[in-house]
Image: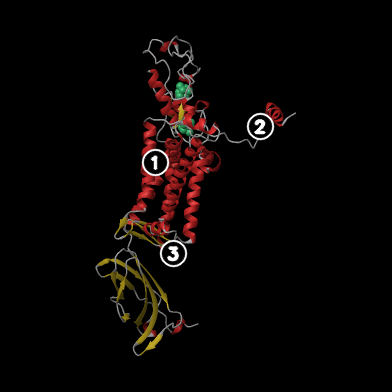
């Protein structure tokens, strides 16, 4: 018994190999309204990624995450480690947005905006440019090695690797000024960590979008597994209208026999023509699905939407476009495969506004409003006042003195003069200079000496220390540090 027969016996007994090689999927190119939407999403999202890194704002890179300086620059705003609660809020907003749109419209994120989807679209396009359409790519892979095959495969690899490296370079360009990085990369003079992250991100893009593709969605993405918990029978999903389509077959339904003369063949690339080679040449009891498999050929995850909702379906709607094309060519109504809800398919009422949608939507609106308010009223100044622990207090002729370390962060982009004011109406006064010049996005450390009353009159006051911008007194921060005296000595 040879190995092959043993495998066949194994499978014939109802078993299957856990290590079966995943067959390569050759998604066919498709056009239509949802493909146009997907293309627009690819241009918009990747456009932002590749272009934003090159924009300047006030003489500095517009979007730059300067990790060594622990400052994030985003279109004129400077974010400091103290602002990281905003990052946490943004992550919560991202998660709530995902929940909200999934409850409302299924896997919109997966089909149109996920990085895996948009980069795979680009890699597929580069593959088409170098190796041709679906049927040509399939033939090329089966063909023995030749100069033509080598040239086409070499061109594809060149385009993929160049694009992946450019992606890695752009990614790192958000953490180190990109113009300088690209200039240094041209002379092979990048740092070790920079080179590592360019290659790592480039390799991840190359591997995920070039080779793993739908495997990432099927086996690596946790969202595919738990998204079913967020869907209900009122969520928008891509569905096949079984009532209308079945029984599928090459013939056509009797009640459609009198419709417009049908084309000789369904001109869908490599899809099979209707059975007789002359569609509409006789009525039958078939449904509207002519079993051309165009919807299967365009599916990037290689599933058949006619088998019902499957976790592998990323909701890209390519099968809708493909089936609409077939219906158009047959002069039949579109929508055999369409966006719908389970309730609509079951001829029940679809409820758009339901508790989970309202809760997700309400939380989302509240959080977005809060972040907008916090960012818009944010003071571009932060101060931190620490007591000098070496000298708790000094006794002078007419009172006591305390020394503090004032840390002053100018969170604006411009150089500014700040004024320090101590207890405008109280018994404390600042000893020394009250003006500090701080560069845009800079930090100044200033030793502050504050004189207060004698120990007997000390309690219960605390000096109020205010720092404000000379050119705009509304940019102000105030703290009231402890003022120590003899009774505080341990
Ligand atoms: S594209 Fe439409 S007609 Fe063709 S197999 Fe799919 S569902 Fe049936
Ligand atoms: S079945 Fe395939 S082509 Fe259709 S929406 Fe799902 S992933 Fe896209």
Mark seen at residue 316: none
**Label 2 vs 1, first from the N-terminus:** 2
Q: Residues within 10 Å of mark 2 (few under 14, many from 20)?
A: few
The residue carrying mark 1 is 42
Q: x, y percentage for residue 336?
A: 43, 23
Of the pair 343 and 259, the residue shown nearer to us? 259
Relative to residue 145, is residue 77 depicted above or below? below
Give the vertical position of 459 relative to 382 (above or below): below
Answer whether labels 1 and 3 touch (C-beta < 8 Å): no
Q: Which of the two discs, 3 and 2, labels the residue nearer the N terminus?
A: 2
User: Can residue 310 be seen at all in this image of the molecule?
Assistant: yes
Mark 3 vs ligand 2: CB below 8 Å: no
Residue 324, percent from left and from top: 40, 25
Q: Circle 3 — which element?
A: loop
Q: Which residue is mark 2?
A: 16
Q: Secondary structure at mark 1?
A: helix
Q: How many numbered discs, if any?
A: 3
Identify the image quadrant of the N terminus: top right
What residue appears at the point 48 percent right and 55 percent down from the top-left corner?
197
Query: Which residue is found at the position 31% from the left and 56% from the top?
Result: 56
Tell me the CA gap for discs 2 and 1. 38 Å
* Residue ranking furthest to the bottom: 397
Query: In this orientation, which residue lies closer to the viewer: 394 or 380?
Result: 380
Q: Which residue is at 24% across, 68% downward?
A: 471
The first of marks 1 and 3 along the sequence is 1
Is 213 drawn above or below residue 202 in the view shown? Answer: above
Residue 333 visible (yes or no): no
Mark number, residue 68: 3
Tell me: residue 31, above or below residue 262: below
Q: Are marks 2 and 1 in contact (CB under 8 Å)?
A: no
Q: CA distance from mark 3 to mark 2?
A: 53 Å
Please state which of residues 86 and 56 is positioned toward the viewer in this rendering. 56
């Amino acid at each position: 018994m040879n190995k092959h027969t043993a495998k066949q016996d194994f499978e014939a007994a109802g078993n299957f190999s856990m290590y079966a090689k995943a067959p390569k999927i050759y998604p066919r190119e498709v056009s239509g309204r949802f493909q146009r939407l997907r293309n627009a999403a690819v241009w918009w999202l990747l456009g932002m990624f590749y272009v934003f890194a090159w924009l300047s704002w006030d003489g500095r890179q517009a979007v730059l995450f300067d990790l060594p300086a622990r400052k994030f620059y985003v279109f004129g705003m400077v974010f400091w480690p103290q602002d990281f609660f905003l990052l946490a809020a943004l992550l919560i907003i991202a998660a709530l947005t995902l929940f909200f749109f999934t409850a409302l419209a299924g896997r919109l994120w997966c089909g149109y905006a996920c990085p895996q989807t948009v980069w795979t679209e680009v890699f597929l396009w580069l593959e088409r440019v170098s190796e041709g359409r679906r049927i040509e790519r399939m033939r090329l892979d089966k063909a023995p090695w030749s100069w033509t095959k080598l040239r086409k495969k070499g061109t594809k690899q060149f385009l993929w690797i160049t694009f992946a490296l450019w992606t890695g370079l752009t990614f790192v360009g958000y953490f180190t000024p990109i113009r300088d990085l690209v200039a240094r990369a041209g002379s092979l003079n990048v740092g070790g960590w920079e080179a590592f992250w360019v290659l790592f991100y480039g390799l991840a893009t190359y591997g995920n979008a070039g080779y793993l593709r739908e495997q990432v969605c099927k086996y690596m993405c946790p969202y595919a597994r738990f998204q079913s918990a967020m869907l209900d029978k009122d969520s928008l999903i891509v569905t096949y209208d079984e009532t209308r389509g079945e029984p599928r077959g090459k013939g056509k339904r009797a009640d459609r026999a009198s419709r417009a003369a049908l084309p000789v063949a369904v001109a869908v690339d490599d899809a099979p023509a209707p059975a007789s080679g002359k569609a509409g040449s006789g009525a039958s009891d078939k449904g509207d699905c002519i079993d051309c498999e165009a919807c299967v050929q365009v599916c990037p995850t290689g599933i058949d939407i006619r088998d019902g909702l499957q976790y592998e379906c990323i909701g890209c709607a390519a099968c809708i476009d493909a089936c609409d094309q077939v219906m158009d060519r047959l002069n039949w109504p579109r929508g055999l495969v369409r966006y719908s809800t389970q309730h609509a398919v079951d001829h029940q009422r679809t409820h758009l506004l339901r508790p989970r949608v309202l809760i997700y939507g309400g939380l989302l609106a509240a959080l977005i409003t809060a972040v907008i308010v916090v960012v818009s009223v944010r003071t571009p100044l932060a101060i931190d006042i620490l007591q000098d622990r070496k000298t708790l207090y000094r006794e002078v002729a007419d009172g006591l003195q305390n020394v503090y370390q004032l840390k002053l962060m100018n969170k604006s982009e411009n150089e500014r003069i700040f004024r320090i004011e101590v207890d405008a109406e109280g018994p404390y006064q600042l000893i020394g200079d009250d003006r500090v010049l701080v560069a845009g996005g800079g930090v100044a450390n200033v030793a502050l000496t504050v004189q207060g009353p004698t120990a007997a009159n000390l309690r219960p006051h605390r000096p109020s220390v205010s720092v404000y911008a000379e050119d705009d007194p509304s940019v102000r921060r105030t703290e009231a540090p402890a003022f120590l005296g003899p009774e505080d000595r341990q």
